[in-house]
Image (cartoon, rainbow, N blue to C red):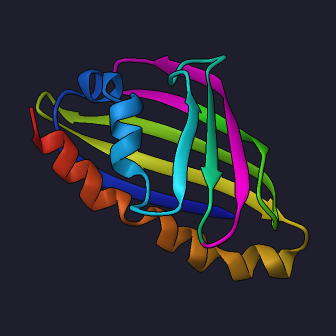
Amino acid sequence: MTIILKTKVPGNYKKVMERFDRDLFEALKPPIGMEIEKFTGSKKGDQVVLKFTFPAKFTWQSDIIEDGHDEKRAWFVDKGIILPWPLKTWEHQHIVERIDDENCSIIDHMTYTCGNALLTTIIKPFLFGAFYPRKKIYQSYFAEK
């Protein structure tokens, strides 16, 4: 299943991608129930480990498996290594795409599966709802210079 969120923000796409750091990750985390246990960066070989305490206790570990840039976009991809039930697979492409010299789009392109097709479909609105607040956070965060 796929979820795609696209958010226009001010800034050069390469400079916006450079700000995908721990500070941004702290800004993106929910107000309660999650701690960043480990964040080593957004480059291939880096790792993110999250500890959730609400609404349930679980660990989520993602490894950065790819990063790059070209004349139109910059990106990195995280792959879920330790995932909460019911997720079986998770891959999140973080793409920053050039619009012009002063604006870009952040694209969260997430693919996932659960134990079966029905569960994969049922969980989509919950995952969408969990990631949708990023749009306003991105706009606010990148409006600050």
- What is the span of residues highlighted in magenta in the rendered image? 55-76
Give the image quarter of residue 95: top left
Q: Residue at x 68, y 69 (%)?
A: 56
Q: Position of residue 4 (x, y in %)?
A: 50, 59
Q: Please determine whether, in this image, residue 4 is positioned above or below residue 56.
A: above
Quarter containing the N terminus: bottom right
**Closer-to-camera residue (99/22):** 22
Give the image quarter of residue 16: top left
Q: Position of residue 84 (x, y in %)?
A: 77, 59
Quarter containing the C terminus: top left
Q: Is residue 123 magenta?
A: no
**Closer-to-camera residue (33/136):** 33
Q: Please determine whether, in this image, residue 91 is positioned above or below residue 136.
A: above
**Closer-to-camera residue (46/128):** 46
Give the number of callouts.
Answer: 0
Q: Main secondary structure of the magenta part?
A: strand
Horizontally, residue 61 falls left or right of residue 116, namely: left
Q: Residue at x 29, y 21 (%)?
A: 14
Horizontally, residue 72 falls left or right of residue 37, namely: left
Farthest right residue? 115
Q: Position of residue 62 (x, y in %)?
A: 68, 37
Q: Residue at x 58, y 76 (%)?
A: 126
Q: Residue at x 83, y 82 (%)?
A: 118
Horizontally, residue 31 falls left or right of residue 89, namely: left
